[in-house]
Image: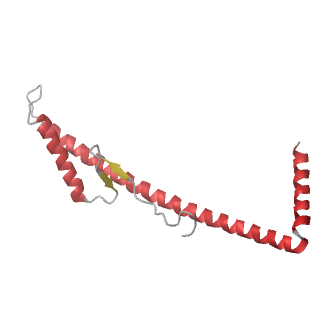
Amino acid sequence: MTGPNADQEVSSLDIVLEDGERIDSSMSAATSQRNSSQATETIHSLFGDQEGPCGASTESSLAEQEATLDAHTDDLHNINLELTRECQKQGQQLQRDKTFQNDLVKDINKVWQECVELVGHDRLMAEFDAQRHDADAKQD
């Protein structure tokens, strides 16, 4: 790729956890499982195996919370992948647009230079100023 941002890559989006740890879109299943296990341990350390108001164990509630956490983690990972693909696609389109724009500018400069060589700079600028003045007068 060419252009002012050619040396920059579109990177994956990162998820930043509360403790500042970053999770990127290449997070492995093992890392996801480790994070899930850490979350479960945190829940257990906070609430232990207390019984609820009806005498039922909170173990099933913890399992539901863990399953919900896993589902949300998977959803976030999938959204992250989708956004990464979309960003890359838009980055590629932007690069094509910049290339097209640069080619147009080069063509305009080439035609301008040829006109300058044919009729001279002063005459060309005088004609250009006259046309601009006429256009301004028509707008008023």
18 left or right of 114 in image: left
List the single residue furthest toward the top. 53
Please name whichever residue, 68 or 114, is drawn nearer the observer in this view of the structure. 114
Q: Residue at x 31, y 53 (%)?
A: 23
Residue 22, horizontal then vertical, whole percent:
31, 52
66 left or right of 73 in image: left
Residue 82, horizontal then vertical, whole percent:
41, 55
Q: Residue at x 44, y 59 (%)?
A: 85
Image quarter where the C terminus lies is top right
Q: Residue at x 52, y 58 (%)?
A: 90
Q: Is residue 72 above or below residue 131?
A: above
Q: Is residue 111 above or below residue 12?
A: below
Q: Is residue 62 above or below residue 96?
A: above
Residue 93, horizontal then vertical, whole percent:
56, 62
74 left or right of 85 in image: left
Q: Residue at x 48, y 63 (%)?
A: 8
Residue 91, horizontal then vertical, whole percent:
52, 60
Please name whichever residue, 113 or 83, is drawn nearer the observer in this view of the structure. 113
Image quarter where the N terminus lies is bottom right
Please name whichever residue, 125 or 63, is drawn nearer the observer in this view of the structure. 125
